[in-house]
Amino acid sequence: MRSFRLAFLACLSILSLSACASRPPEQVAAAKLAFAPEKPTPAADIMSFPGPRRGLAGRAIRVNHESDIVLARGEVALTFDDGPYPGRTSAILDTLDSYGVKATFFMVGSMASAHPGAARAVAARGHTIGTHSQDHRNLSSISFEAAMADIDQGRRNVMAATGSPARFFRFPYLASTPALRQQLASQGIVDVSPTVDSKDYFSSTPDQVRSRAISTLVRRGSGVVLFHDIHQRTVSMLPGFLDDLKARGFSVVRLVPGQDGSAPLVASATPASVPQ
């Protein structure tokens, strides 16, 4: 009986093997996949997609509210704070011109008054003007009245230097209060916060600034980048940074004031955070 059982099992094994051998290869492969599924193919990524690259200059985004700044994957908005600064601001303008892209410059009122020629050059070369207070004080640490006086004085001085009204504003140190944001919104002023901090105000080499900004952008996929046109390290790293953007398929968008300047704006509940 034992020998009969062994013979019977042997016959079953032979029949099974012959059945597998007689199946088409695609059926055998399908059977394997039922137990070991293939990994899904990842979606195309603008930072790693092979082939010809598009131009670096992207679209213009009309902004009446901060919520209008909606960037697609691969879009970057360049912003520069604290200037203008003789020599350095003009060098940044030359670099931006050579790559055919535009940026937004958030000027300090006292700097614009001290260097009106540099301020006028920014506007004359087609970049967007924003303001950054009169004296770069922490506006959240002083009274509401003093803070608004500082903001208004800065706006007047920047307009006097550039000849252009500025509807964009950025709080020094990104330090704001709900009351200040509400007041600016009621005046039709858009508070533009960055989402990528290059930290070019740290004691860093140009390559460190460039690497820090690029790595954050690649991780996020898009962003409003904070730079400062008062630092030589920023001047030095900018051509390489723009080369990196182009090589990875990014485009540089331009933020411009919208059309309904008379409409009140809705202040955000909290200021945008800057990723570390």
Image (cartoon, rainbow, N blue to C red):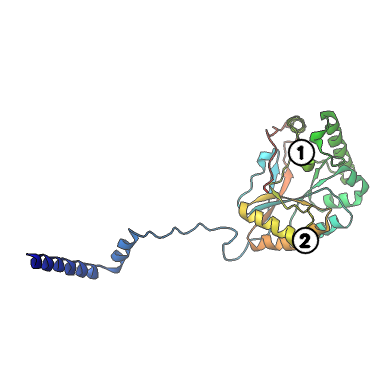
Identify the residue shown where x is 72% and y is 47%.
255
Residue 272 screen position, x and y as percent: 68, 41
Q: How many marks?
A: 2
Q: Find residue 263 and report its image quarter.
A: top right
Farthest residue to the right: give it: 114
Figure check: 65 above or below 229: above
- Foreground residue among 82 and 129: 82
Farthest residue to the front: give it: 2
Q: Residues within 10 Å of mark 1 (few under 14, many from 20)?
A: few
- Foreground residue among 196 and 54: 196
The residue pinned by badge 2 equals: 205
Rounded to the nearest angstrom, the CA distance separating label 1 from label 2 is 27 Å
The residue pinned by badge 1 equals: 175
Q: Amino acid at mark 1?
A: Ala
Residue 261 screen position, x and y as percent: 75, 36
Q: Find residue 239 and report its image quarter.
A: bottom right
Identify the residue shown where x is 71% and y is 46%.
194
Q: Amino acid at mark 2?
A: Thr
Q: In the rendered view, does 220 fall on the left or right side of 258?
A: left
Residue 49 screen position, x and y as percent: 56, 62
